[in-house]
Amino acid sequence: MASATFGRMDPYLTTKWLIFFWIPVAPIRSLRLLEIGSGSTRPFRLWNSTYVIHQTTGPNIKQVLFVYAFVVMLVLAIAAQDYVLSPVAYVLIVCVCFVPWLLRRFARQRGDKSLNSSPTP
């Protein structure tokens, strides 16, 4: 079962970025990857995953727009500290920071459902 393992059972799309001080500046290319396993048994094994590149394309416009939208939301949340009460501003920043995690979780669940619902030959 795909959700019980650390590795993905199906290829997924990711975008490689030009980064400046941890801020994505420009997309370089998009890659369709298949995670084939973890390279380590240490606690941070997710950082040491091994991938196979199935396809390399130009930047995926949908992912690029989502990343830029996230950066804008984060900047606005940080700027909101001047206009709202301090605890509310911190909660807003934390909520914005969880958006990529939530989107990835929903995408994986959707991918797992499509794998389970697809007819087997």
Image: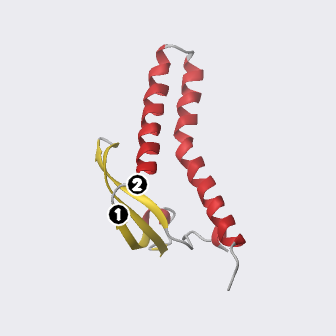
Residue underneath mark 1? 57
Question: Position of 91 compared to 38: left or right?
Answer: right
Disc number placed over residue 118 in the picture, else none: none
Residue found at x 48% / y 32%: 73
- The amino acid on which the numbered mark 1 sits, given as a three-letter code, is Thr
Disc number placed over residue 60 in the picture, else none: 2
Query: Compared to 101, does 11 lie above or below?
Result: below
- The amino acid on which the numbered mark 2 sits, given as a three-letter code, is Asn
Measuring from the top left, give residue 26's x and y in whole percent. 30, 46
Measuring from the top left, give residue 119's x and y in whole percent. 70, 78
Residue found at x 46% / y 49%: 62
What kind of element bears circle 2? loop
Q: Which of 60 and 73 is in front in this view?
A: 60
Question: Residue 87, located in which quarter of the rendered image?
Answer: top right
Q: Label 2 neighbourhood size at 10 Å, few (<14), some (14-19), many (20+)?
A: some
Whether residues under marks 2 and 1 lie with C-beta atoms below 8 angstroms apart, the answer is yes
Q: In which quarter of the image is the C terminus?
A: bottom right
Measuring from the top left, give residue 27's x and y in whole percent. 32, 50
